[in-house]
Amino acid sequence: MKKIFFAIACMTIISCEQTDMLENNISTVPSVSQNSLSENVIEFKSKEDLAKVIKSDEDLTRSTVSMFKTGGKFISMMDEIDSSYEHWNEFSEDEKKCIVDEKLTYYEALGYADLVPNENFAKLLNNKGEIIVDDSLYRITPIGTFCADTLNSKDIDACYNRLVNSKDTIKCNADGSVKLSSNVTFYNSFAAVNKSDFNYNSTRAGGYIPLKYYGSNASSTWVGGLLASIFGDRSTKEYEYISKRKINASLYDYNYGVYYESGALVYTERKRGGWFSWINGWKDYDADELGIELKNIVFELDFKTPSHVQFPKELTFVCKNTVITSNLSDKPIKTVDICGYDIDYKMIANALKFGAQGLSSLFNDKNIPSDVGAVRILTPNVMYIVLADCSISKKNTHQIRKVFNSGVNFFVSSTIISDPLSIKSIVDVFNGTRSLPVKHIKEGRAIFTSKIDGSWGGIVIDKNYTNGGKEYIYK
């Protein structure tokens, strides 16, 4: 019932509240026409402005968010549900009591914690999952993101209903989008983390912690059974390894059209009391310790290099002393750039485990920087970014979220056109893509561990998990 109600809630039309506005460096824009069916929604002039706010160093306050609203009262996704909610009377008395007693937000009760792991982004959405950017209305739903050029929510409603009830095969473009009508575009936001539950590794003897394994495989096609994909498992996996206590983990790769983000999230919860037919029965719970370990993370960036760029036949170093930036690190990551045709990025990822020594041995080159942390690989069609293994842990907290990278812009320099046959054009591609945002997680394994009430447990999520590759973690 919870997930069915969530699908209905995606259609709800709401209103917004006038609050103080703060000065900052983001452009403001005029309000949406009062004739629009999607008034009272946060509005941004551009995707770049939206990304600046989402990636701000500090958590967004209500006052900061209010400067972008387009109408009167604004009901945020992060607001608590109360009796003014349109569907309040559809709750049972027990559900209403739970909502009031636990002070549940729309974000918690309607499942958006799985759909929008970045809380800064969630604060900018209304409780219908909507935002306006560059004169387009975006609505995030359980099945993906809808974008209407007209700012008319009825266009989205019609396409949503048609898509939910359709049994036809829907093939998205390379960027995960498809045009549903002259006004509405659909983004298959959650396809890169498809639902796939593999071997469960029960408690082992020998002192290492019990782990539960999951896999996720990228896909750009939906074939029939659409309702199952709507109401099925999300990318967030869970493991109740202690009675009424569980660890939740996500290796996510979401494209909302207006913004995209990849990252890893782990959090712990305890079971709520009472009996509820659909309401979220779990509440945040501080763990003794949480950890995330990332292995063999490879990003794939398809920026469509012009076909007339001349690539060397042999594997060639372009530069051994560049840097990239990522939310994985507080400082730029030292990078070596490689280009060529047939490159085994898995082999390079394995060599990178041993740092400069491993790369030097693989390429028979002793001049690799000692602090190398990544390798960028340019092929005629795709760039790969391979990151060195890393980990993070925190004590006495209920959540850790690590964003790999995010953004809205792509860049390919014009030097490619003016000087297509020289190595300079390849260097220029690398230079122009230093700030190229992560588009897709190609490979990778994330190991999430938690110590709850003195006991350890963990979840392993692998982009291409099979029966092999067991982890043995001692605590």
Image (cartoon, helix red, strand yellow):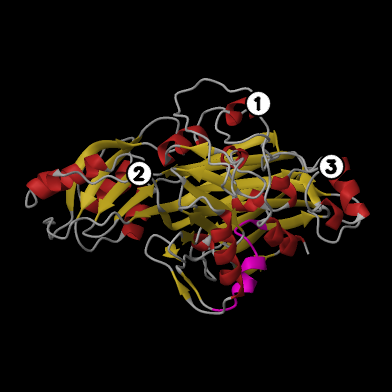
Q: Residues within 10 Å of mark 1 (few under 14, many from 20)?
A: some
Q: Kindly identify the residue that appears in the image at 75 percent across and 56 percent down.
A: 241
Tell me the element at label 3: helix
Determine whether, in the image, residue 331 is placed left or right of residue 341.
right
Q: Kindly identify the residue that appears in the image at 38 percent across and 66 percent down.
A: 173
Coordinates of residue 289 in the picture (x, y in percent): 68, 39
Depth check, front residue: 5 or 473: 5
Q: Is residue 124 visible?
A: yes
Coordinates of residue 247 in the picture (x, y in percent): 70, 51
What's under tag 3, amino acid-wise? Glu
Q: CA distance from mark 2 to mark 3?
A: 40 Å
Q: Kindly identify the residue that appears in the image at 60 percent across and 57 percent down.
A: 141
Give the vertical position of 350 relative to 40 (above or below): below
State which region is magenta. Answer: 224-237
Coordinates of residue 19 in the picture (x, y in percent): 65, 26
Depth check, front residue: 201 or 184: 184
Depth check, front residue: 336 or 26: 26
Question: Nearer the viewer's eye, disc 3 or disc 1?
Answer: 1
Badge 3 is on which residue? 102
What's under tag 1, amino acid-wise? Thr
Q: CA distance from mark 1 to mark 2?
A: 31 Å
Tell me the element at label 1: loop
Res. 19 mark: 1
Badge 2 is on which residue? 409
Coordinates of residue 454 in the picture (x, y in percent): 77, 43
What's under tag 2, amino acid-wise? Asn
The quarter of the picture where the N terminus appears is: bottom right
Q: Kindly identify the residue that appears in the image at 43 percent across and 65 percent down.
A: 178
